[in-house]
Structures are given as structure tokens and as C-alpha cells.
């Protein structure tokens, strides 16, 4: 059972990319004040958002191996298809980082060498104190290490998965290898997902810090990845494919969306409540900028990403209804893009940021690119794995 990436669908992805590219160019040339900063900020927002979805898919695949979970085996090709976008995502992030390194934008304020020179009028004692960690050579070494590690593990998972297709289900050799690989990956991911959150996102607001920021970023990535998995499965089933996925599978995937939404909410509230309660000026500045200048986006993000899934995904029937899950999934998907917008824009644009043609167009460009890469990857192999020791358990998965 294979997916055919039709010319019509390809044209749609090209249209999305074309519209997005046009909006980016218009943003550069007709954007007025702060045009370049705004465009690069938009590229970072959507680039990081879709990077997180691809990485979350690799993480969730590794989690299934480590837990020896049988129910999700029927989704394995979906995980692999989404994670195929990871190398492309890495390239887009590197372009943003290179532009910052050569001062084509000032999203990363700390990259300005004058901030570290005591003789300069721009000297910043707080940022200078962070120089042992937050310096360009060390930062680039960490960045390339993160991306290299994630891509290497993703490719190795895929390679061994395809090799496993030629084995009998009773042969667990490749499964054991992937299980060991997954355990190593999860440990590395646990550390690096926190530090890349500091490096790429938290360092935008260089004076501010949060000890749970990495977990908060991770929870948003995870829920976005789960929603994308759900939407892709629903799309493929609407094409008459993946008939081996039953209501119980979809209910379990919906449970993950529901549950991780509460994890995100817990971390959102923990981070906000502790700083609000302490009311220390250098700590609340992060939230003050977002609440004062981006009020509707800040509170809208909370409502969409917590209230909507809590109210709409509580019942079993809601999780099993493809149309309803599509509706809720699209809303949550947009909500977590808004969450990334809130990570980046107030620090990068101060009070000059907003959601307009550039931001929406850039999102569409990355959505088109993401769908092209993922759907192309899904078309290369059968949507149902072979040789996995838990395949039969997954095919007969049933819950009341």
C-alpha cells in the first residue's frame, strides 16, 4: 500500500512556496522601517516551528522503541516521513544564524562585539558576563553538533527500519539495535533540547533566563508534531490509504494530543506564575513586553493551546471523529505557531512586530516546503512496515 504524490498535490505545495517567497521578497523591498529585521524574524519563527515538528517526530519514534510500544507501529512510516524534513529544516536555521553572524539582522543582540568591550559606549556588563557560554565560536560548535546529532540518528533509524522490512517478525535483531539507538538518542535529546532552546530562542532576550524554558519549548514542539501526525494520517485515510489504522489508533493519538496539551499548559503556567509572584524587575521584563505589546496574542495562545483541547478533546468520540480532529488539530497547530511567534518577536522586534502579510506568507512558504518533503518521503515506501516484531499487535490494537 503506497502513497502516490500526485502532480496536483505537488502543484499545491509549489503554489504555497511561491506565494510565501513572493511575500518574503515584498517584505524585504516594500516593508519600510525594520523590513529586514521583520523578514528574518518571520523566517526564524516558521523555520524553527517546522524544525520542531520534524524533531518531535524523531523523538516520538525513539520513545516508541524505548518503551517497546506496539500500538504505534502502524504510524511508523508517518514518523519517518515527517522526520525526513529535518535536514531541510537544519539548512533554513543555519541560513538565519549565518545572517545574524554577518549582521544582516539583529535578532541575536548578543552577537554584537561592542557589547563585550568595556571601552565601548554599548558595553553591557550582563551580556559580557555570559560570554564564556554565549560566544560565537562555542555557539556555532554547539549548533552544528545539535543538528548533526539529530540528522545522524534520524537517518540511522530510517536505514535500519527499511532493512527490517526484509526480516521475519520473529527476527528481533534490528529492533534491538534500534531500541539501543533510541535509548542513547533520548538521553542526548534530553540534554540538547534544553540547551538549543537557550541558544536559539532564549538568547534572543539575552538578559532574561528561565530554568524550565527548555521543557516549555519541547512541550510545544511535541504537541505540534503530534497534531501534524494526526492530520497526515487523516489525510491519507481520506485517500483510501492506511485502512489498517482503526478508531482505537486514532483515539490513542488523540489522547497524546490531549495529554501533552496539559503538559504545555503546566509549564506555561509554572513559568508565568513564579515570575509574576516574585515580581522582580529583571525577571518579569520578559512577560511584561509580551503582555503589554502583544496582549491578544499572548492570551490567545493560552486559550487556543489549553482551553480548546481541554474542552473539545475530552470525549472518546471526539478523538475518533476525523472531521472534528481535523478542525481541532488545525486550531491547535496555528496556536503553537503563535506560541513560537511569542518566543521570538517581542525580543527581536520589540513593539514593532505584528502578524501580517510577511508572517503569514513565510508560514505558507515553509508549510509548502514541509509538505513537499514529507509527502515525497511517504511516497517512496509502503505505508505499512514489514518485519517489525510488534506489527501484529498494532494491527489488532483495540480499546473500548
Image (cartoon, rainbow, N blue to C red):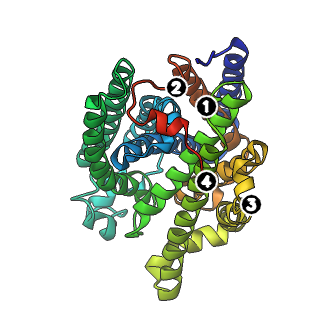
Cβ atoms under marks 2 and 1 closer than 8 Å: yes
Q: Of label 1 and label 4, which has the lower sequence position?
A: 1
Q: Position of residue 361 (x, y in %)?
A: 69, 36
Q: Is residue 59 above or below residue 217?
A: above
Q: Which mark is residue 336?
A: 4
Q: Of label 2 and label 4, which has the lower sequence position?
A: 4
For residue 339, side relative to residue 274 (left or right): right
Q: Of label 2 and label 1, which has the lower sequence position?
A: 1
Question: Residue placed farthest to the bottom in the image?
Answer: 278
Q: Which mark is residue 384?
A: 2
Q: Residues within 10 Å of mark 3 (few under 14, many from 20)?
A: some
Question: Residue placed farthest to the left in the image?
Answer: 132
Question: Marks 2 and 1, how far apart in space?
Answer: 8 Å
For the residue labelled by badge 2, is the local secondary structure a helix, a strand or a loop?
loop
Q: Position of residue 254 (x, y in %)?
A: 62, 51
Q: Of label 3 and label 1, which has the lower sequence position?
A: 1
Say which residue appears at 34% left-offset and 38% top-offset: 150
For the residue labelled by badge 3, is the local secondary structure a helix, a strand or a loop?
helix
Say which residue appears at 56% left-offset and 54% top-offset: 256
Q: Is residue 72 above or below residue 9?
A: below
Depth check, mark 3 against mark 1: the one in front is 1
Q: Of label 3 and label 2, which has the lower sequence position?
A: 3
Residue identified by numbered label 1? 244
Residue identified by numbered label 3? 312
The quadrant in which the C terminus is found is bottom right
For residue 331, side relative to residue 196 (left or right): right
Q: Position of residue 259 (x, y in %)?
A: 56, 61
Amino acid at each position: 500500500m503506497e502513497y502516490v504524490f500526485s502532480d496536483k498535490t505537488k502543484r499545491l505545495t509549489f503554489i504555497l512556496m511561491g506565494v510565501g517567497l513572493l511575500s518574503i521578497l515584498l517584505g524585504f523591498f516594500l516593508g519600510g522601517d525594520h523590513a529586514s529585521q521583520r523578514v528574518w524574524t518571520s523566517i526564524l519563527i516558521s523555520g524553527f516551528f517546522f524544525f520542531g515538528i520534524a524533531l518531535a517526530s524523531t523523538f516520538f519514534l525513539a520513545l516508541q522503541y524505548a518503551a517497546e510500544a506496539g500500538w504505534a507501529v502502524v504510524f511508523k512510516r508517518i514518523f519517518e516521513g515527517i522526520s525526513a524534513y529535518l535536514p531541510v529544516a537544519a539548512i533554513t536555521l543555519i541560513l538565519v544564524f549565518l545572517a545574524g553572524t554577518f549582521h544582516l539582522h539583529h535578532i541575536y543582540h548578543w552577537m554584537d562585539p561592542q557589547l563585550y568591550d568595556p571601552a565601548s559606549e554599548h558595553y553591557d556588563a550582563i551580556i559580557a558576563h555570559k560570554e564564556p557560554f554565549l560566544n560565537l565560536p562555542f555557539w556555532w560548535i554547539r549548533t552544528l553538533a545539535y543538528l548533526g546529532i539529530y540528522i545522524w540518528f534520524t537517518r540511522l533509524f530510517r536505514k535500519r527500519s527499511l532493512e527490517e522490512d526484509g526480516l521475519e517478525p520473529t527476527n528481533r535483531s534490528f529492533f534491538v539495535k534500534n531500541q539501543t539507538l533510541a535509548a542513547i538518542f533520548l538521553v542526548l535529546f534530553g540534554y540538547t533540547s534544553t540547551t538549543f532552546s537557550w541558544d536559539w530562542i532564549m538568547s534572543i532576550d539575552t538578559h532574561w533566563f528561565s530554568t524550565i524554558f527548555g521543557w516549555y519549548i519541547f512541550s510545544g514542539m511535541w504537541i505540534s508534531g503530534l497534531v501534524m501526525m494526526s492530520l497526515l494520517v487523516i489525510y491519507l485515510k481520506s485517500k483510501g490509504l492506511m485502512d489498517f489504522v482503526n478508531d482505537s489508533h486514532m483515539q490513542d493519538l488523540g489522547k497524546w494530543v490531549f495529554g501533552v496539551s496539559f503538559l504545555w499548559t503546566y509549564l506555561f503556567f509554572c513559568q508565568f506564575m513564579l515570575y509574576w509572584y516574585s515580581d522582580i524587575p529583571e525577571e518579569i521584563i520578559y512577560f511584561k513586553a509580551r503582555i503589554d505589546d502583544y496582549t491578544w496574542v499572548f492570551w490567545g495562545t493560552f486559550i487556543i493551546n489549553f482551553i480548546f483541547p481541554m474542552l473539545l478533546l475530552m470525549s472518546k468520540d471526539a478523538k475518533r471523529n476525523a472531521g472534528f480532529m481535523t478542525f481541532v488539530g488545525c486550531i491547535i497547530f496555528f496556536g503553537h505557531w503563535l506560541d513560537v511567534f511569542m518566543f521570538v518577536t517581542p525580543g527581536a522586534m520589540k513593539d514593532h512586530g505584528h502578524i501580517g502579510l510577511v508572517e503569514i506568507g513565510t508560514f505558507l512558504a515553509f508549510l509548502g516546503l514541509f509538505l513537499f518533503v514529507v509527502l515525497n518521503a511517504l511516497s517512496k515506501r509502503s505505508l505499512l512496515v514489514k518485519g517489525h516484531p510488534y506489527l501484529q499487535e498494532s494491527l489488532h490494537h483495540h480499546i473500548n
